[in-house]
Amino acid sequence: MSDANSPALLDVQLAIERYKRFAVATHVRPDGDAIGSLLGLTYMLRKLGKEADPYCQDPVPSAHRFLPGSRSIRHSIEQPSFYDAAILVDCGSLLRVGNALADSIGKIPFLINIDHHMNDTPFGDIFWVTPSVSSTCEMLYHLCGQLQLALDPDIAAQLYTGLLADTGSFRFSNTNRQVLALASALVEAGAQPAYIAEQLYESASPESIQLLARVLSTIAFSSDNRVATAELTQKMFAETHTLPEDSEGFINHLRSVKSVELAVLFREDDDNELVHVSMRSKGKIDVSAFARRHGGGGHRNAAAFRVSGKLDAIRSEYTEKALDYLAGAS
Ligand code: 5GP
Ligand code: MN
């Protein structure tokens, strides 16, 4: 069934018509689809005359601060009782919004979940999840149509940003005819492709490139160069005066190697006891299944999870597991 005909889409429409005050929220360490869908939906709701506030526990990455409304994103919900409903966008689970925000959202009586991650455990009063689409922003475009809401340049820029980010600038296997038609419709409504691409991809700070140089110096290849791993430590962040958001997209450099089918980036968390493991793959290798097995999730070619322990030990243990997984998958 195409996304535009999903029964859950009608449920979302009815809930939006029924309620007045909405808290919209997205996941920690937000990417382009998270911020684009968070702001796009907030603006859509306001256009319908609703009260809507955007929430994200973490700061907005600097590359996304050009988006209209990005400076109004709040980081915690002061008064959950104010809202009739919460809408989560781009979140594979409630906890993806972060513990504190998840706590507050738990106090809001009605929960709507709009997402495109693979998910075995439905949650929320309305669960509209379509893993076959490129991005949460693509789903919101269909929602706009369902609500008979005209696009405007702000909403077009917000949704285009999510589309661009989650298709890897129209390069990944989720880029298809619908996605390009949707991009065209967004440009017609006022999104500016060159301007948005420059904001997202040509706005790095000198410090983040220093950080990238350090990360790339840790690359190791195994299994006939089919697997590439690298690491990112707290020391590197400290030395370069950078934050985790400055490392967005680094893992793509590992996957850009022709022979590499599986890329893994190990990132030390700030308390040194937790390691964030990011995975990217090419083709049919499903990293989301591997990530779910270890308490995380994501998409077939992009997924992540976190494990407790020291970076060195985790890197060797999970590189071994990834090699076994690749051997089993091929
Ligand atoms: P990243 O490597 O950029 O941290 O994450 C890759 C992808 O996996 C993103 O689409 C992200 O939303 C998703 N992801 C990361 N961590 C989790 C997790 O714990 N659970 C789920 N369901 N998805 C995750
Ligand atoms: Mn997404």
Image: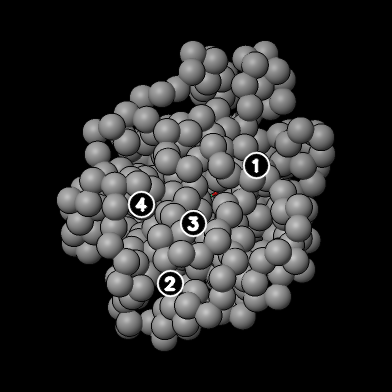
Q: Are marks 4 and 1 in contact (CB under 8 Å)?
A: no
Q: Which residue is mark 2?
A: 130
Q: Nearer the viewer, mark 2 or mark 3?
A: 3
Percent position of residue 241, x then y? 65, 16
Q: Residue at x 32, y 66 (%)?
A: 149
Residue identifier under label 1: 58
Label 1 neighbour load within 10 Å: few <14, some 14-19, many 20+:
some
Q: Please give the label number shown on residue 42.
A: 3
Instruction: Check disc 3 and report its element: helix, strand or loop.
Output: helix
129 above or below 55?
below
Amino acid on which the number 4 mark rests in the picture: Ile
Upstream in sequence: badge 4 or badge 2:
2
Please give the name of the residue rendered at 62% of the width and 51% of the height, measured from the top-left corner. 55
Locate residue 115, reporting x and y percent. Answer: 49, 66
* Sequence order check, earlier mark of 4 and 1: 1
Instruction: Give the alpha-carbon distance from disc 3 to disc 1, as whole Å.
Output: 17 Å
Specify the amino acid type for callout 1.
Asp
Residue found 44% across the figure and 49% down from its top: 36
Left or right: 242 with respect to 165? right
Q: Is mark 1 within 8 Å of ligand 1?
A: no
Of circles 4 and 2, which is in front? 4
Specify which label sits upstream in the sequence, 3 or 1: 3
Q: Is residue 158 above or below residue 4?
A: above
User: Quick check: is the Cβ at mark 4 less than 8 Å away from ligand 2?
Assistant: no
Q: How far apart, in angstroms, are the residues tagged by discs 3 and 4?
A: 9 Å
